Amino acid sequence: MIAWLQKLFGSSIGKKLLMALTGLLLFGFLIVHLAENLLIYADRDGATFDGYVHGLTSMAWVPLAELALAALFLVHIVQAVRVHLANRAARRTPYAQSPGHGGRTLASTSMIVTGSVVLLFLVLHLLQFRFAPEETRHASMTRLVRGEFEKPLTLAVYLLGLIALAIHLSHGLQSALQSLGLAHPRYTPLVHRLSVILAVLIALGFATFPVYFFASGGSR
């Protein structure tokens, strides 16, 4: 069984399949994470959000879930790099067509770039919130979020990161479905449009937090 899995995920198709599966799981995490963060709007003082965060961090299974999530990110990144390098190695001659032909788009040709920006964005996000001083996080996560997002530089960095996320997801979703064999010529245009719409909605949802707190901080 192990040998079969190694053979499968060592092949070109297997690499893309594993990248697609991990990508879709990470997209599911983004949806859940966004839904959790929306609790910050439940009341003006953020009591609901703070209560949820404190309750969540006190659960014994959370560290294991974080390790599993980190492993998911690592596998996705490694597979993305492997697929990218394999594609480059297979490209013996320059493309005769311009990037705008053959299904190539800005999103599809910049996946490594946008993925790298998203990774840096994630590291910054973890340093600001997950690995902030424990006493600060326990005092009030809402206060920590508000304080960080009132900074102009943080607002600019987050918006840049979310633009990269939207571009990355817009192609990643449709590519993942295609790798899983769920694409069909008849429905491909619809899948493409839905992928773009979902990517934009996710990015806009997360963008509301820095924009809201920056605007509200400036009006105080």
Image (cartoon, rainbow, N blue to C red):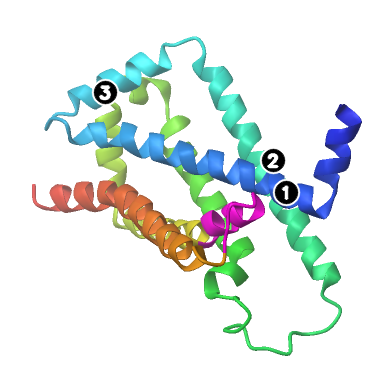
Quadrant, the N terminus: top right
Image quarter of residue 109: bottom right
In front: 54, or 124?
54
Q: Is mark 3 in CB contact (under 8 Å) with mark 2?
A: no
Q: Nearer the viewer, mark 1 or mark 3?
A: 1
Residue 111 lies in what quarter of the image? bottom right
Badge 2 density bin: few <14, some 14–19, many ≥20, Cα 10 Å: some
Task: Tell me the kind of residue under disc 2.
Answer: Val
- For the residues labelled 1 and 3, the Cα–Cα distance comes to 36 Å
Residue toward you, 166 or 161: 166
The earlier-in-sequence mark between 3 and 2 is 3
Judging depth in this view, the residue of 47 and 10 nearest the camera is 10
- Residue 216: mark in rendering: none
Disc 2 to disc 1: CB gap under 8 Å: yes
**Amino acid at the residue labelled 1:** Gln
Spatial CA span between label 2 and label 1: 6 Å
Residue 111, compared with residue 49, is above or below; it is below
Tell me what residue is drawn at x 69 percent, y 53 percent. Answer: 80
Residue 101, percent across and down?
60, 84
**Residue on which the image places disc 3:** 50
Question: Label 3, label 2: how many angstroms apart (C-alpha)?
Answer: 32 Å
What residue is pinned by disc 1?
79
x and y percent of residue 194 in the render? 41, 59
Residue lying at 60% horizontally and 25% vertically, measured from the top left: 67
Q: Which residue is mark 2?
A: 75
Hey, which quadrant is residue 158 in on the image? Answer: bottom left
Query: Magenta span covers which residues?
Result: 171-184
Q: Amino acid at mark 3?
A: Asp
- Residue found at x 69% / y 40%: 75
